[in-house]
Image (cartoon, grey):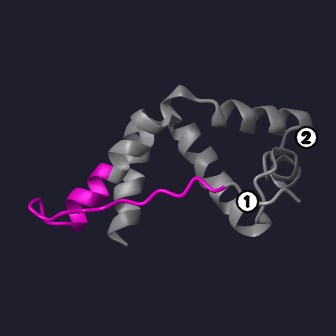
């Protein structure tokens, strides 16, 4: 639960209220749709606007400079590491860049 509070406080510092709501909505849609296809997400998006507008809204959100790895995600990772591991411990991170099958 501490992770959720950490994420939420970071999101609110880095994004506008509208952007935070869009992020929450995208996470919710990804959970239920189990797809990352923008067209499918736009089709089930609960915003009361036209399909093409929902699609463009999602695309613009995902292109935000403030969502870039160094600016947005690295500080979250750093905070989690600092919170969960002692400063004098050795930590080895493994990153998998495998690309899954296209369906």
Query: Residue 62 sits in which quadrant?
Result: top right
Q: Which residue lies at the image location 37% right of the left edge and 72% below the top edge?
A: 1
Task: Evaluate if marks 2 and 1 touch, with contact meaning CB atoms under 8 Å apart.
Answer: no
Q: Which residue lies at the image location 73% right of the left edge and 59% below the top edge?
A: 100
Location of residue 61 in the rendering, given as x and y in whole percent from the top left corner: 65, 35
Location of residue 97 in the rendering, given as x and y in whole percent from the top left corner: 58, 53
Q: Is residue 17 above or below residue 40?
A: above
Query: Residue 28 sits in which quadrant?
Result: bottom right
Which residue is labeled 1 in the image? 100
* Mark 2 vs mark 1, CA separation in Å: 28 Å
Instruction: Say few, some or many: other residues with alpha carbon within 10 Å of mark 1 (under 14 / 14 to 19 / 20 or more).
Output: few
Callout 1: SS: loop
Query: Residue 81 sits in which quadrant?
Result: bottom left
Left or right of residue 82, residue 49 in this image: right
**In magenta segment, residue 97:** yes
- Choose between 87 and 55: the one closer to the eye: 87
Q: Which residue lies at the image location 71% right of the left edge and 60% below the top edge?
A: 30
Left or right of residue 70, residue 45 in this image: right
- Choose between 27 and 101: the one closer to the eye: 101
Labelled disc at residue 21: none
Location of residue 24 in the rendering, given as x and y in whole percent from the top left corner: 59, 54
Q: Is residue 65 above or below residue 9?
A: above
Left or right of residue 93, residue 60 in this image: right
Which residue is labeled 2 in the image? 51
The stretch in magenta equals 78-98
Question: In which quadrant of the rendered image does the C terminus lie?
Answer: bottom right
- Point out the tag, 2 or 1, that comes first from the N-terminus: 2
């Amino acid at each position: 639960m501490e992770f959720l509070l950490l994420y939420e406080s970071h999101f609110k510092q880095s994004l506008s209220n509208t952007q935070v709501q869009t992020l929450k909505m995208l996470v919710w849609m990804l959970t239920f749709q189990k797809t990352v296809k923008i067209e499918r997400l736009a089709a089930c998006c609960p915003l009361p606007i036209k399909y093409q507008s929902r699609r463009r809204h999602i695309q613009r959100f995902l292109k935000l400079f403030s969502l870039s790895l160094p600016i947005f995600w690295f500080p979250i990772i750093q905070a989690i590491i600092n919170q969960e591991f002692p400063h004098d411990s050795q930590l080895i991170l493994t990153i998998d860049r495998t690309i899954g099958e296209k369906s």
